[in-house]
Image (cartoon, coloured by chain):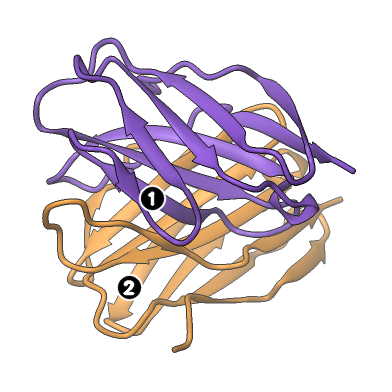
Chain colours: A purple, B orange
Amino acid sequence: DAKTTQPPSMDCAEGRAANLPCNHSTISGNEYVYWYRQIHSQGPQYIIHGLKNNETNEMASLIITEDRKSSTLILPHATLRDTAVYYCIVKFNYGQNFVFGPGTRLSVLP
Amino acid sequence: DAGVIQSPRHEVTEMGQEVTLRCKPISGHDYLFWYRQTMMRGLELLIYFNNNVPIDDSGMPEDRFSAKMPNASFSTLKIQPSEPRDSAVYFCASSPQTGAGNTIYFGEGSWLTVV
């Protein structure tokens, strides 16, 4: 079973920041937080991951709370092409079972 | 670099027929996964391999499903006999050797319709 809770859907205006929350209150010390997204008809795509510290790459930023019980994925300037289902996953750094929950369906509106 | 390559992209078959889905992982990746996605159940892990050896097949629905990985660059997922409830998108994914913060990379999927 997925260990995360995400809102089922969100809207965001084009050009604005999209902030996608994820609750993972039972996360353990060795578990990473991963974010993937799935654009319609495509395979899931890796976005970013982190353990404790905030992370940023060319796609997004990941903010993890100090107690690690929740995190937020930030798309700084959302475009229409960011419309997708976003999955938050927690997983140990060993083992390979990525468990996908239902995710958040983000709609970027013009 | 080539990503994970799956074939066929789309297949329509009649109930009772055998279906074989194929996957070529990213070169150098030691792990290969098969996932299934449906509207009802979302994205489910069926089986994964490490160095061509099946590690966890607990997600394989029943004996009609089988998966093989004869070498590091090829895997198959076979359904025999197929049933309408097997209609889904089947994704193959691969990952390098496990390590801190490793990620998996998905193919574009094989869309299966069983009529």
Residue at 45% in and 22% down: A22
Local crowd size for mark 1, using a 10 Å CA cut-off: few (<14), some (14–19), many (≥20):
many
Q: Return the chain for callout 1.
A: A
Q: Amino acid at mark 2?
A: Met
Closest to the observer: B56 or A88? A88
Residue B1 position in % (x across, y down): 44, 89
Residue B44 position in % (x across, y down): 49, 38
Residue at 58% in and 27% down: A102
Q: Amino acid at mark 1?
A: Ile
Residue at 32% in and 73% down: B69
- Answer above or below: position of B23 versus B38: below
- Answer above or below: position of B105 versus B56: below
Closest to the observer: B109 or A71? A71
Local crowd size for mark 2, using a 10 Å CA cut-off: few (<14), some (14–19), many (≥20):
many
Q: Which residue is mark 2?
A: B69
Q: Which residue is mark 1?
A: A48
Residue B41 position in % (x across, y down): 61, 29
Question: Helix or strand or loop: what does disc 1 sit on?
Answer: strand
Q: Is residue A3 visible?
A: yes
Residue B50 position in % (x across, y down): 19, 63
Residue B107 placement: quadrant:
bottom right
